[in-house]
Every structure is written in C-alpha cells, then in structure tokens.
Amino acid sequence: MPAHLLKGQKALVTGANSGIGKATAIALGRAGADVVVNYVVGADEAAKVVAEIEGFGVRSYAHEADVSKDDQVSVMVSRMVDEFGTIDIMVANAGLQRDAAVTEMTLAQWQKVIDVNLTGQFLCAREAVKEFLRRGVVPEVSRAAGKIICMSSVHQIVPWSGHVNYASSKGGVGMLMQTLAQELAPKKIRVNSVAPGAIRTPINKDAWETPDAEADLLKLIPYGRVGDPDDIANAVVAMASDLLDYVVGATLYVDGGMTLFPGFATGG
Ligand code: BGC
C-alpha cells in the first residue's frame, strides 16, 4: 500500500482499541491519515494504538464514546472537527456479539447487539455526513466529499444459527450502507462496506484458539487460512482511498472464500 495514499485525510475508527478496528486505525495512520481512535472500554490499549499511529508522524488521539448513544457520537465528531478541522473517513467498525439460541436470547441481548452494531453505524454515519456536506469536496485531499466504510460481516448474507441478533444486525448494515450510498452519491459521498469472514480477533477466539476448533473453522474457508486483522485493514485503506473512487455502494467480502458455499465443493 503506498505510504502516502491518505496523506492529509482525517479518519475516525470506532472500536479501534482491539481487533479489526485497531489494525485499521494503525493502517490508516501508516497511509498518512490523522486518526481518532474511538473506544468504549480499554483506555490503555487505545493509548497504545495512538502511540503507534503517532510513530508514523501523523496526529492521533483516543476518544471514549459509546457509539449507540446519540449525544456521545455527536460530541465525538464535533471534537474531531475542532481538533483536526474536519473528517474525511468514517470507519463504523465497533461491534459485538451476545450469542444465544433463540429461545434463550433475552431482549437485552437482542437490543444490545442491534444498538451497537446497527444503530451505532447509523449515528456515526449521520454525524460524519453532516460534516462532509458542510465542507464539500477538497480536490487536493480527495475526489470525494467523504467516505463512510461500514464494517459488515459474511453474516450480512450468511444465516448464522445461535446468533440471530448478530446476523440481523449485519443484514441491516447491508441495507443501511446501500441506502446511504444511494442517497449520498449525488453529493459525492462514497458509502461502502467491508465484510470480513473469520479473522483472528478476540470476538471469535473460541473458533480458532485450539487446533481442533481451527481445523473445524478451516472447513468453512476455501483459501485455507484464518484471516488476520491486517487483511481487513488493508481493504479499508484501499476502500477509503481515491484508488477506489468509483466504488459506491459495494460490499467487499474479505473472507478467504467463506461466502462461496464451500460445502458445495464436493456436495450438492
Ligand atoms: C463474527 C465471527 C465469525 C465470523 C465468521 C464474524 O462476523 O464476528 O465471530 O467467526 O464472522 O463466521
């Protein structure tokens, strides 16, 4: 990835103190962007991410906010405009799982996942778009007036037994993204999703941390390896850059082929 691909751009990554968000924030900084590292718990880890990003000679700070809270999201974005002058790239990444069989799933488990994974992306996108529209295109910075990248999942299209809250939230992210893309493209705002498969992060540790679990997981991944956070981070950098300026309303699956129905390679 060219080092100066995002030079002069201002990015915010939600849930940036661990997993995919952390790798993405660091990759954006390496590509030359100034980066706000959002987190909700885990200030120490967020501070380490900030220090690593500052090592690239760009600006960064950590900001605590719960993405599912309207007031906290608007304060987060207005502080960014105060400190960095504007926002060019919003990576709506923060997400969580609260797994249970449907008969065991509480309304609280359902609601928490929808609030963070879906409503959180709506609030973050809305606040970023207000600033994109205020500022408009600055051709020296980017051909677009702003970029929103929604962190989706293969479960945007792959049903997932025992995870109805999570799969529903990601299905919703797909339509949130496409509708915003349609609404905002005439304003030169690009909205797209990156949809990871199984990536080695804390969210799915049970699925890869023992050799048996990993062997089971690999049956679902034609490409034969569990993904790394950098696989996703690199996709986000590309999606945010002008290299992909004509990509509008797309979901980029970064999943080692997980969405290719691998069971059908020998069956059917
Ligand atoms: C989930 C992971 C899961 C992966 C593939 C992700 O969206 O968060 O827990 O391993 O999808 O199923």
Image (tube, grey):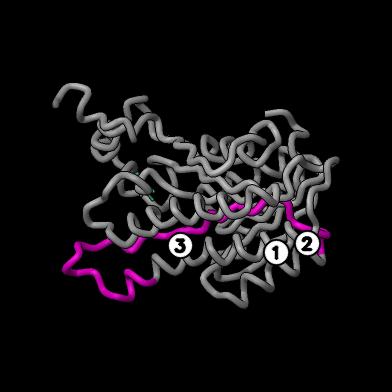
Q: Is residue 248 left or right of residue 34?
A: left
The residues tagged by marks 1 and 3 sit, at their Cα atoms, a distance apart of: 19 Å
Residue for point 50% across, 50% down: 178
Magenta span: predominant SS is loop
User: Who comes first in sequence, dot 1 or dot 3?
Assistant: 3
Residue 46, x across and y down, in percent: 62, 59
Q: Which residue is drawn at 63% across and 48% down?
A: 185
Read off the residue under disc 2. Answer: 134
Is residue 251 highlighted in magenta? no
| Labels 2 & 1 near each other (Cβ < 8 A) | yes
- Closer-to-camera residue (6/138): 138
Q: Which amino acid does label 3 sit on?
A: Leu
Mark 3, secondary structure of its residue: helix
Q: How crowded is mark 3: few (under 14 residues within 10 Å), some or many (20 or more)?
A: many
Tell me residue 54's x, y (percent).
76, 49
Please name the amino acid that badge 2 sits on: Arg
Q: What residue type is labelled 1?
A: Lys
The residues colored magenta run 83-111
Residue 134 lies in what quarter of the image?
A: bottom right
Residue at figure coordinates x 34%, y 34% from the top left: 258
Whether 5 is drawn above or below 14: the answer is above
Residue denoted by label 1 = 130
Q: Which residue shows up at 14% across the image and 26% down it?
A: 268
Q: Disc 3 and disc 2: Cα gap in Å?
A: 25 Å
Q: Mark 3 points at which residue?
A: 118
